[in-house]
Amino acid sequence: MDEFSLIERIAARTAARADVLLGIGDDCALLAPPPGQVLAVTADTLNAGVHFPAETPAFDIGWKTLAVNLSDLAAMGAQPAWCTLAVSLPHSQAAWLDAFADGLFALADRAGITLVGGDTTRGPLSLSVTAMGWVPAGQALRRDLARAGDEVWVSGVPGEAALALRLWQQGQLDVASVQADADLEAVRLRLLQPAPRNALGLALRGIATAAIDISDGLSADLGHVCRRSGLAAHLQLADLPSSPALQQLAPGEAAWPLQTAGGDDYELCFCAPAAAHAQVLAAAAQAAVPVSCIGRLEAGHGVHWVDGKGAAWHPSRPGYTHFSGV
Amino acid sequence: MDEFSLIERIAARTAARADVLLGIGDDCALLAPPPGQVLAVTADTLNAGVHFPAETPAFDIGWKTLAVNLSDLAAMGAQPAWCTLAVSLPHSQAAWLDAFADGLFALADRAGITLVGGDTTRGPLSLSVTAMGWVPAGQALRRDLARAGDEVWVSGVPGEAALALRLWQQGQLDVASVQADADLEAVRLRLLQPAPRNALGLALRGIATAAIDISDGLSADLGHVCRRSGLAAHLQLADLPSSPALQQLAPGEAAWPLQTAGGDDYELCFCAPAAAHAQVLAAAAQAAVPVSCIGRLEAGHGVHWVDGKGAAWHPSRPGYTHFSGV
């Protein structure tokens, strides 16, 4: 399989969008911007053995490569539009590439994002996506516009992806196979096929004051919002969402480090005025994404947790700071 | 050096642009599109040992990583605006990253393109850029709009980069050191620091009917234009531009395979009506880039060369088809 059949293999599967004036096959793609909007751009890379176990199925790698970038668009409140893809593959493997594309396009078609260019090169397995989306001027969900008094919210159940990673590291979870145990299978899919919260990000335009996606752990990522907005977060461990899988596999306090400092969740953490509490719940219902209010922002700095008795508690590690992420 | 100092190291060096509403440091950059224009997007990856010798200096890797993408914008007639960068590095090396950034930003500042996001990860050395630019609607230099009767032009001197690569493979050129011999140094810099022809691409808007950049070799790349436009190219070897370095290091017919099938030149090959001959020369003079008329497009298909006596000649290889390029 040479360069040109690789190209055709991928280009043939891209979905049509009316704003793609010229797609894959020229020096550049040509794309029509919608009027009155601002372009949101993000880029993230996944490397084998660093960002996912080497034995991860190709479908899941394709899904997650796009998911982590869609999650950044979600955290900005941007409508996904286009993406580019750089694939480095050790060998020219049609079957691997097809399965990878199955995962990538399964999510791309769901999110309405179209591949408009890219590059397939020989090299150690590495996947880079640059994703582009649109948000009306002034409505982007930035990190630096949270306000004192805002409530702090989180979507879904942070901690399940970190739980899956730990179980894999302990030899208790095979990431490459469907698990017979329903709880194990639930956390496996949370790690391999995270669901980016684009519908929620769009629904929170005009309601949330700030948002970030949870890639490095809830405390670490909310810490960026606090730092950029010049505020402190005060949070209740008792208000953290849980799940049957977390309760079964990391009962009680064992869940706290996962929930507060686990990475790879791709949930949204966002802030909104307390007066907008009902609006947040309505937006979440519209997006069909569960959300939980876990605390409040105040003057000061740092991210502060208290347990059910009001005693201060600190995550055992500050979240992922792997060698990554501009 | 952890994730955040890497981020700060790169973000601190990005040039300001008024259309960057929010740069590196949030989930996405926010960018203001100019009115009435179309977004041109391209993505290219360079891997150590595949796209450049492992001993290539970091400065040159930074330069070339951006140059190959700027060249695609040039071939589309698009004004460079923004880019994202994905760097995979085996180890966290501040000195290497600084030298790499020196090369990248030397060219970025010259071209007026601003880094707006990216990702630095641990892994085998690999560099991916997605570049974005703008072109007025209807003025892009596509591959599929050449017309029968058009003249075929090429910028600069294709073949010098391939000559440098061959000399390196033969142990006659050290890519990591300034060469005492002026001709050797000239071709070394052509391989390591190609000059993307953005000024020429912009000057050719409204004049050229089609354009492509020469990354895989003149014959192979012009072949894409012929195929997409449904035409044949008839070209004269005698009209190919040469240089003191080529004449010295690959005299006479020895230059032909390099000139017609060598890759990595990042010159532009473009087509324009014969009636626009003087306009092309004026545009090239305005851009301060030498151009040569090397033949003509006619009905038919394929790329056909003749020597000084009118005899048909075929390149010894069809251009790079390394495992690459969507």
Image (spheres, coloured by chain):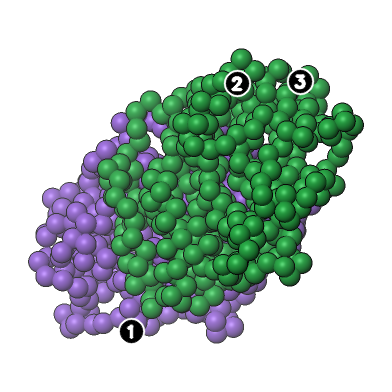
Chain colours: A green, B purple
Classify A284 as above or below A85. Answer: above
Find the residue positioned furthest to the right: A311
Residue matched to label 1 = B316
Tag 3's secondary structure? strand
Tag 2's secondary structure? helix
Tag 1's secondary structure? loop
Establish whether labels 2 and 1 are both on one chain. Answer: no
Classify A279 as above or below B67. Answer: above
Circle number at residue A298:
3
Question: Which residue: 65% across, 69% down?
Answer: A174
Give coordinates of residue A3: x percent, y percent.
Answer: 38, 72
Find the residue positioned furthest to the top: A275
Dot 3 amino acid type = Glu
Q: Residues within 10 Å of mark 3 (few under 14, many from 20)?
A: some
Residue matched to label 2 = A277
Q: Mark 3 lies on which chain?
A: A
State how far apart marks 2 and 1 are (Cα).
71 Å
The reply, left or right, for residue A235 in relation to residue A265 is: right
- Label 3 vs 2, first from the N-terminus: 2
The reply, left or right, for residue A114 in relation to residue A158 is: left
